[in-house]
Amino acid sequence: MEINKSLDESKIIAALLHDIHMSHGTVFNYRSYKLTLQKVNKRLRAEGIGFLTKTCPRLGKAFDKALAGERNLNCTDLGFENLPGTQLPRFLVELFRNVLQPDGRLLQHPCAKCVRDIRQILYLFYKYKLPYSHEQEHEVIAKFERTEREIESLQEDFANLQARLDNSCHNRRRSRPQWVAPPERPQVAREAKILLSDLFSCFDPHDIFPRHGPGVVSTRERLWDKYRWTNISRTITEVYPMYEYFYSSLGHVCDCYKDNLVTEEPKAAKVSLVPKDSRGPRLISCEPVDFQWIQQGLGRAIVRHVEQHPLTKWNVRFTDQSVNQRGALLGSYTGKYATLDLNEASDRVSIGLVRLLFPEHIVRCLMACRSHGTELPDGRVLNLHKYAPMGSSLCFPVLSLVVWAILTAGAPDDDTREGIAVYGDDVIVPTHYASNAIEQLESFGLKINRDKSCISGLFRESCGMDAFNGTPVTPVRLKTVWSSTPSPEVYTAYIDYCNQLYGRQYYTTYDLIVGSLRAIYGPIPGKDMHLHCPSLVDVPLSERPSKSRTNPFLQRKEYRVWDVKSPKVNRRIDGWSMLLRFFAEVANDRNRSTSSVLGVTEQPSADIDLLDGFRVELYTSRRTSMLVRRWR
């Protein structure tokens, strides 16, 4: 195989088709491999990369629906030519025949390995982060505004329902009801409110340890400026007093209170568009620095409480996706569980819904640290009727609890309630409850993504696990665009892709990408060398790094390899602010969390490299990683 620094999409597809030919030689023979490769190259010349990022995924989604038994595969409007007399596409038809009948229905005994290989081809470039156009930006922003208008219309409805509940919630039930028929919305709302009241009955929302998150803030403070308060909203200080939550000690208050200005009007959040995939950008909202400070502390406290409370610790998770993944795998084999996916989930939890379901002492704190408006890229400020857009540290916990409370309240019996698993907008429910669950969620203004929800057939997907008949069929999705110029993002991403491809036995594709990486970066270590750096799962001895030394201090052999490093920024600020940073990020163990949802890892801070030790004047600049040679 020719090894060079260039690696375009057609070469990767060719290698992948070769792997499929080697795996299905009697079905997908050499002639089929060559003809399919010719079709791909022809479509790429005619349509460009859009064939792989848009056309193929459309066929993949229709194929998934056929696997789920929801509709027969029909390629008429998908950009593929049908095989005469069938509903199957000519493209990869040899593999489709082992999964679907000629009319597009699922075979009685489909081949799971063919399913995996078909989906691998169709979804390989679905998440490719290509530059997006201004039209795509405008479309995302318009959708954000349209959703805001839709949930605004629900506020009066929720207020009326709240008034009804205020007159009935004092009559609390002693045990969970067993519904004979699907309950009405007021019954579900009342039961959901009681569930959340029970959950937070012993929770003190003021017992928090604020801190800053790793993200950008709308007020544009740099990392080292975040601890010097110059502007705090009165809406926060009325619930979280400034002297108690924003200063390191009373001495800090006495020395610096004159520098701080408490404002009556809170600062607005700010919309930011970040790369997502080939379909366009993702919209997030950057929070003001004072809001982010409290949100991070309150969000972590809620996460800890929910993951430990007997009511929710088996059903709601923020740090462990494996439960939902196992549920999808089991559901695809037994049919016992269905997977639901929420559409625009974070944007459809309205203020009215939060006030309706959460107890009053929690609502007061949640509302104190939410942004009332967000600034759009054109300078307009949009008043928010959602509780919090993506970007707020409270967005994910509040969404998860709203979904759990509604589904649990509407479940017909205790067995159904035990089968509910919520991880944000990924939900597992017993199959017999799936249709009612969708109705319950949509009756409260949430929206189900029916294209990604699976309630029948042999296919399920949740939290990154795509499963068919008890077999994982999750494809490797390339996201980072290849570059022949050395890049830390490309180096680390493609090593990870290679390891995933190797695990799925796509050895030709693995060798192709590894060869191209080696042509640019030189020898790459293997995982069995146990080095703390990006490593491949399989590297021959002759191709491993050869430059080595013996470290006399650690008494071990080390190799000179590529590693990723972020440059450090030394910035000394006033002593009180540095002390506040120390207390927030290191001094209190309760302030450490492994929650990926809130944007942190097991390290005390995303801005700290523990290998070099924590120092209050040391910061790590975001998105400035670089490749360096190190002894490992």
Image: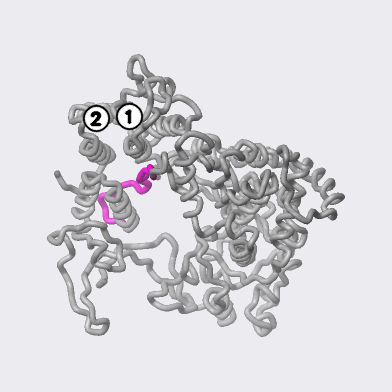
Question: Which residue type does callout 2 highlight?
Answer: Val
Q: Which residue is mark 1?
A: 98
Can you give x and y, in whole percent of width and height, for residue 180 in the image?
73, 39
Q: Magenta stretch: dominant SS?
A: loop
289 or 309, nearer to the observer: 309
From where the camera sits, is residue 257 visible?
yes
Q: Which of the 4 image quadrants contains residue 345? A: top right
In the image, which residues are magenta?
A: 472-487
Q: Which residue is mark 2?
A: 27
Q: Crowding at label 2, few (<14), some or many (≥20) Cα neighbours within 10 Å?
A: some
User: Does the magenta run of residues contain 200?
Assistant: no
SS category of the residue bearing label 2:
loop
Question: Which residue type does callout 1 highlight?
Answer: Asn
Look at the numbered discs 2 and 1 and tell me whether their residues touch, using CB distance below 8 Å: yes
Seen at 36% across and 43% down, the residue is 475
Q: With respect to residue 615, does 269 lie above or below? A: above
Give the spatial CA distance, label 2 vs label 1: 9 Å
From where the camera sits, is residue 46 visible?
no
Can you give x and y, in whole percent of width and height, for residue 117 in the image?
32, 38
SS category of the residue bearing label 1:
loop
Q: With respect to residue 101, does 548 lie above or below? A: below
Where, quadrant-wise, is the C terminus in this rendering?
bottom left
Can you give x and y, in whole percent of width and height, for residue 441 in the image?
65, 41
